[in-house]
Image (tube, grey):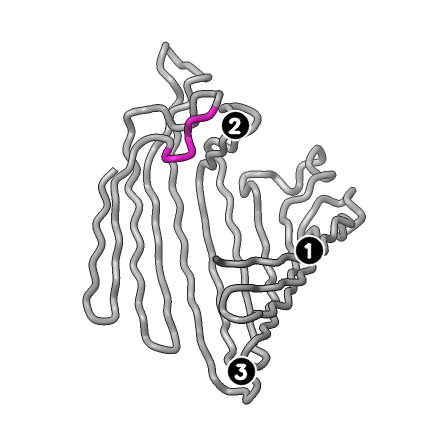
Amino acid sequence: GLALRGKYRMLGWKIGVFNGNGVDGAKATGGVDNDQLKDVIGRVTADLGMVTAGLSGWYGKVYDYTVLTNGEPEEYDRQRFGADVQIFLDLLPIGGTALKGEYIWGKTQISDKTFGAGDKLGKTSSGWYALVTQNLGKWNQLAVRYERFIVDHGVDRDLAANQGKVFENAELQTALHTFLGGNTKVSLAWFHPMYADHGDTVTATDPKKDSFIAQVQAKV
């Protein structure tokens, strides 16, 4: 591929044309983007000091060689759009506060699986998250994040056959980070997944799949 970047005052931009599976595409299945089609990917950012924001986009096409029509593979659009914003505040005496949020929409998802049941060709998904981080003195930070994700916008939510499905997932995440010097970080995190929207026969809103994670990261 070919990529260019530039900056003018508070605005920055990146744009590129790409082809192929990328550096992680040499799978046993032969990859998932083996065609001559090109993708255009770009991003524009604005840095206003305490507020930074960005818009990103992706446009391309992909072939599904497992489905042939008159000897030709099926062609699908691959489109994505994203928007993000970060606000940095210094209001509390205990440390700085950051508010971050991002929304992403995409059509045609590609995974590292073989085309077919493992992929979402031709389908549309979207999701968003909001994140608050609060520094607690010089060495500690508290983070709380809430996110929601719709796997497939094309699902008929009124269809009887879909009343046992989950249409939209959500998750609440909290973490406490402690920095030990400049090279080590200890994190304690809790992840609480939820069913944000589902069919009538799904009675539970909590899938009972909470995770508790303790992690140490060291840089040498």
Give me the disc on residue 90: none
Q: Residue at 46% across / 34% down in the picture?
A: 110
Q: Residue at x 50, y 74 (%)?
A: 98
Q: Are marks 1 and 3 in contact (CB under 8 Å)?
A: no
The kind of residue tagged 2 is Lys
Looking at this view, is 45 or 154 the one in front? 45
Identify the residue under disc 1: 213
Residue 24 falls inside the magenta stretch: yes
- Sequence-wise, which precedes: disc 3 or disc 2? 3
Tag 1, which secondary structure? strand
The reply to whether discs 3 and 2 touch (Cβ–Cβ < 8 Å) is no
Q: Does residue 101 sit above or below 194 in this rendering?
A: below
28 versus 89 height, above or below = above
Residue 1 percent across, percent down from the top left = 25, 37
As drawn, 59 above or below 27: below
- Give me the C-alpha separation between circle 3 and circle 2: 45 Å
Residue 43 shown left or right of residue 129 in the figure: left
* Residue labelled with disc 3: 95
The secondary structure type at the circle numbered 2 is loop
Q: Position of residue 205 (x, y in %)?
A: 75, 52
Depth check: give the residue in front, 100 or 69.
100
Splitting the image into 4 quarters, where does residue 17 fall? top left
**Distance of label 1 from label 2 (alpha carbons):** 28 Å
Say which residue label 2 marks.
Answer: 113
Question: Which of disc 2 and disc 1 is earlier in sequence?
Answer: 2
Label 3: few (<14), some (14–19) or many (≥20) C-alpha neighbours in 10 Å = some
The mark nearer the N terminus, 1 or 3, is 3
The kind of residue on which mark 3 rests is Gly
